[in-house]
Image (cartoon, rainbow, N blue to C red):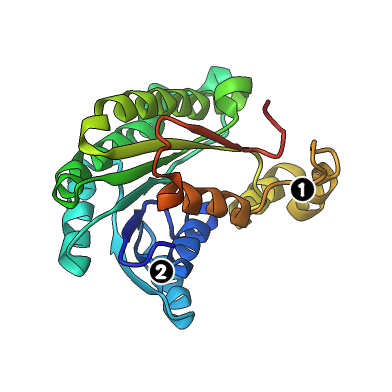
Amino acid sequence: MLKAKVAIVTGSTGGIGEGIAQALAAEGAAVIVSGRRIEEGEQVVAKIQAKGGTAEFVQADIAREYDCFALIRTCKVHFGQVDILVNNAGIFPSTPLTDVTAAQWDEVFATNVRGAFLCSQAVIPAFKRRGGGVIINIGSTLVNRGMGDRIAYACSKGALLTMTKVLARELLPLQIRVNWVTVGWVATPGEVELRNQTHGNGQAYLDQMSSRMPLGRLETVEDIAAGVVYLASDAASHITGCELNISGGLWI
């Protein structure tokens, strides 16, 4: 489905990003795995290569402007082109509303919004040379339903959704499609660890909550990755400015 395509997935050293990178590679894309954690990133690359896929790791912290542009340049060095950018990297500190500091707010927005914008801006020239491209932004149901201890995260995702719409309209003449995936509650290893801290036994808590979800379970990484593969493919060639809701009914 994605043979001869090259994809960059930010924040793909684990969790949802890793799942997206593996799914894109399984469909034939060459993938740049990217994030701050070198060892974990190289492990993801090794998993992809062990399955016959093509991948390289590029360390990047997209909260830093230089890293955003260097990421795109390095991808072109490795593979000569870029066709797909998945803006997945994000941070989501849990802090009581009254305790959120200006520094924490800025840190969340630097990664979740500014970093996604700078990566998108940096990839446009490469897309122009290819006659088009795909940007997929990974979102959240918290844009619509909020959560007091995640206010910075929720607001940053709201800004990312607005950016998705603006970029989709502005980049139409360049045949660059820009879409958004609404993510609900995904049982990633990071989510389990977070719930270990807040509820003691994170896995038991998530298992209990699964039965209360509208479709009877939490989402999986594979659920999200399948949606990204579709939006990245030619099967979605007439889809832009879309909000693909993969929340299992958590938000309707």
- Determine crowd level at label 2: few under 14, some 14-19, many 20+ residues with C-alpha closer than 10 A: some
Res. 77 image quadrant: bottom left
Q: Picture coordinates of residue 65 (x, y %)?
A: 20, 41
| Nearer to us in this view, 161 or 5 | 5
Left or right, 152 with respect to 165, comes to right
Left or right, 81 with respect to 44, comes to left
Q: Picture coordinates of residue 151 (x, y %)?
A: 53, 23
Q: Tell me the quarter of the image containing the N terminus.
A: bottom left
Residue bearing the label numbered 1:
206
Residue at (21%, 31%) from the top-left corner? Answer: 173
Q: Are marks 1 and 2 in contact (CB under 8 Å)?
A: no
Residue at (57%, 20%) from the top-left corner? Answer: 97
Residue at (53%, 59%) from the top-left corner? Answer: 19
Give amino acid for label 2. Gly
Q: Number of numbered discs present? A: 2
Give amino acid for label 1. Leu
| Nearer to us in this view, 32 or 150 | 32
Res. 109 image quadrant: top left
**Which-is-in-front pick, marks 1 and 2?**
2
Res. 149 image quadrant: top right
